[in-house]
Image: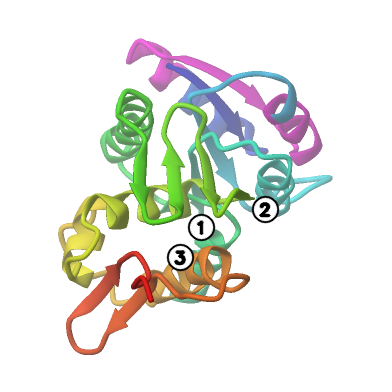
Amino acid sequence: MKLLIVEDDEDAAKFLVKAFGEAGHNPIHVGDGESGLHLALTEQFDVFILDRMLPKLDGLSLLKQARAKAVNTPALILSALGAVDDRVEGLRSGGDDYLTKPYAFSELLARVEVLAKRTNNEENEAILTVGSLELNRLSREVVRNGEKILLQPREFRLLAYLMQNAGTVVTRTMLLEKVWDYHFDPQTNVIDVHISRLRGKIDKDFDEPMLMTIRGAGYKLQAPEVR
């Protein structure tokens, strides 16, 4: 597994490079956001591990610019900023996971390996279609009525899960477990944020909505009724 580690604390970076190397992975380290963005745009990685507070370009700005260039590599944000608003901001910026410092390396390793494994597994699955909405796991493209829709990695995974369960109600607990790999409620509005962003992309410019909120139950994706 090839990892991009963007961390300006030299001691922390040395520890991560050594630990991931001993775990059998290939960590590449840079110490500032501009260098990290350059590598993110020019090389292939399995996972990004990004500090938030970086010289030249902060971690969230790095991630936003990478996502704007359609770089969908899973990203884990590693930061001392652990308040709810900080975590939500990190996810809104395109992060797939967020781990606060201090942390146990065993947990960081597990989270990174889950992100990489999940992405590899997804690429082996078939095309999903619900009405005029199509999701291609191989090309990682989403199209509705022939119009391409650009999604961030977490939005892509969320939509894929909703499409796999099209026509049925998906609860918040199911989304936390299957999309975020949480087996507890983190007490944040992360699901609401991502559902709102996803709805804005797949429904906003189309006549018939597909993503429904079922009050008190969860969410449901379904094809518009034929009139």
User: Mark 2 vs mark 3: which is more N-terminal?
Assistant: 2
Tell me the magenta residue range.
18-40
User: For the residue marked with disc 3, what is the amino acid?
Assistant: Gly
Q: Which residue is drawn at 74% across and 47% down?
A: 65
Please give the label number shown on residue 82: 3
Please give the label number shown on residue 80: 1
Judging by the rendered image, the residue that carries numbered circle 2 is: 53
User: For the residue marked with disc 2, what is the amino acid?
Assistant: Met
Name of the residue lying farthest toward the front: 227
Quadrant location of residue 217?
Answer: bottom left
Secondary structure beneath dot 2 equals loop
Foreground of the two, 182 or 11: 182
Q: Judge left or right: residue 115 versus residue 35.
A: left
Residue at mark 3 to residue at mark 1: CA–CA distance:
6 Å
Residue 28 falls within the magenta-colored stretch: yes
Residue 113 visible to the viewer: yes
